[in-house]
C-alpha cells in the first residue's frame, strides 16, 4: 500500500477538511481527492462523508484510523532503524518550533547524547502544524511547541514559561513614541491580551506568522515587535535590540509533546535530560528578568497575565 495515501487519510481525518489537508501537504485539492479515492477503492469502502462543511469519517473510516496510524508508525520505525549510522544502536527524533531550539532543543540533544552515547538523534524544525503532523506520523517522537495540538496518541506536558517582551531596533523608544510596530502572530491568547493592554498597536500595517524568525526582520530594519525574551537576549547584549521599558510583558508557556508509545527506557531518559535542560534555561531566564526589572524607568506593575491552554 502506498504510504502517501495513508498520510493523506490521516491529515484529512485530523483536519476534517480536504482543503486544510491540501494546505498542510502542499499539494492540489484534486491530488488529495484522488489519493483518498484510491485508498477507498483499495479498501472497498467509503472512508469520508463529503459535504460543503468538510469531511467526516464514516464508520468504516473510524475503524480504519487506528490501523492507519499504526501503519505510519511501523513505516517510520523501519525507516529510522535502517538509517541508524554505524556505531549507534538506538535512535530518537525530536522536533521544535524555531525559537525553542537555541535555548532548549540544542541543549537537549547534547544532554541526550551525553547520557546515551549510543543514541543517534535526528532533529526537525517547523511551525506547530508541521511538527504535530510529524508526531502523528511518527517522524518525531517528542517535540517542543508553544501552541501544541491535542491529538490521539500524544501526551502534552509543560516545558518552560517564556515571556514576550517588546523590543526595538533603535534605543530609547517608549510606548508613546513607538513607531514601526510589527505584529507577530503568537496565537489567539496573545492577540487578545495585546488588544486589551495596548489596543493602539493592533492596527499594525505589518503582520507576520513567523514566530521568532521575525526577530531577524526586526534586527535589520527600523522596527519593533514582541519577541521571546530568551531568544532576543544575545541581541540585547549586543545592543542590536533594545527593550521598551514601559511596555507590558506577556507570559508565554512552552510545552513538550510526547508520543504515548515511546519506549519506556528511552522516555525516562528523554524526560530526565529535558528536565535538566529546562532547569538551566530557567536560571538563565531569571537572570534576564532581573536585568529587565532593574532597567531605568521599568514598571513591573504593567505586567499582563496571559495563559495558553
Image (cartoon, grey):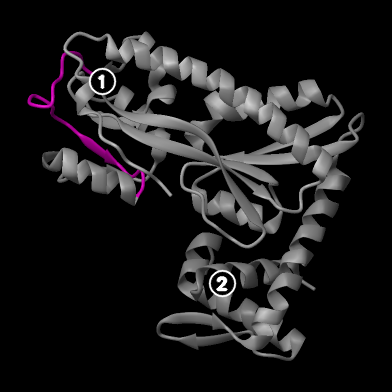
Residue denoted by label 1: 169
Task: Residue 271 in the image: state x and y as whole percent.
Answer: 69, 34
Label 2 vs 1, first from the N-terminus:
2
Q: CA distance from mark 2 to mark 1?
A: 42 Å
Q: Nearer the viewer, residue 152 or 127?
A: 152
Residue denoted by label 2: 12
Give the structural element (helix, strand or loop) at label 2. Answer: helix
What's drawn in magenta, residue-wise? 168-187
Q: Nearer the viewer, residue 191 or 18?
A: 191
Compared across the picture, whether 133 is left or right of 217 comes to right
- Please say if 279 is above or below 291: below
**Residue 190 shows in this picture:** yes
- Residue 102 is covered by the magenta coloring: no
- Residue 177 is covered by the magenta coloring: yes
Which residue: 65% across, 30% down? Answer: 274
Which residue: 57% across, 74% down? Answer: 32
Amino acid at each position: 500500500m502506498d504510504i502517501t495515501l495513508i498520510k493523506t487519510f490521516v491529515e484529512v481525518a485530523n483536519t476534517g477538511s480536504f482543503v486544510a489537508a491540501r494546505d498542510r501537504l502542499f499539494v492540489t485539492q484534486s491530488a488529495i481527492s484522488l489519493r483518498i479515492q484510491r485508498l477507498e477503492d483499495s479498501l472497498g469502502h467509503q472512508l469520508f462523508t463529503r459535504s460543503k462543511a468538510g469531511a467526516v469519517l464514516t464508520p468504516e473510516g473510524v475503524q480504519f484510523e487506528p490501523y492507519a496510524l499504526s501503519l505510519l508508525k511501523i513505516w517510520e520505525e523501519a525507516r529510522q532503524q535502517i538509517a541508524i549510522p554505524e556505531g549507534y544502536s538506538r535512535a530518537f527524533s525530536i522536533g521544535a518550533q524555531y525559537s525553542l531550539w537555541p535555548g532548549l532543543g540544542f541543549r537537549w540533544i547534547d544532554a541526550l547524547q551525553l547520557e546515551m552515547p549510543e543514541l543517534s538523534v535526528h532533529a526537525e524544525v517547523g511551525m506547530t502544524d508541521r511538527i504535530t503532523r510529524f508526531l502523528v506520523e511518527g517522524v518525531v517522537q517528542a517535540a517542543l511547541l508553544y501552541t501544541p495540538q491535542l491529538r490521539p496518541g500524544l501526551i502534552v506536558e509543560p516545558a518552560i514559561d517564556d515571556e514576550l517582551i517588546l523590543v526595538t531596533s533603535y534605543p530609547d523608544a517608549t510606548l508613546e513614541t513607538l513607531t514601526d510596530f510589527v505584529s507577530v502572530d503568537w496565537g489567539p491568547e496573545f492577540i487578545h491580551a495585546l488588544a486589551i493592554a495596548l489596543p493602539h498597536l493592533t492596527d499594525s500595517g505589518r503582520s507576520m506568522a513567523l514566530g521568532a524568525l521575525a526577530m531577524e526582520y526586526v534586527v535589520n530594519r527600523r522596527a519593533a515587535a514582541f519577541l521571546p525574551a530568551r531568544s532576543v537576549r544575545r541581541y540585547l547584549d549586543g545592543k542590536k535590540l533594545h527593550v521598551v521599558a514601559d511596555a507590558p510583558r506577556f507570559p508565554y508557556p512552552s510545552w513538550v509533546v510526547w508520543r504515548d508509545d515511546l519506549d519506556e527506557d528511552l522516555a525516562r531518559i528523554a524526560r530526565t535530560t529535558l528536565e535538566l535542560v529546562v532547569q538551566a534555561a530557567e536560571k538563565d531566564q531569571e537572570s534576564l528578568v532581573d536585568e529587565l526589572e532593574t532597567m531605568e524607568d521599568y514598571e513591573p506593575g504593567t505586567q499582563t497575565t496571559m495563559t495558553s491552554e
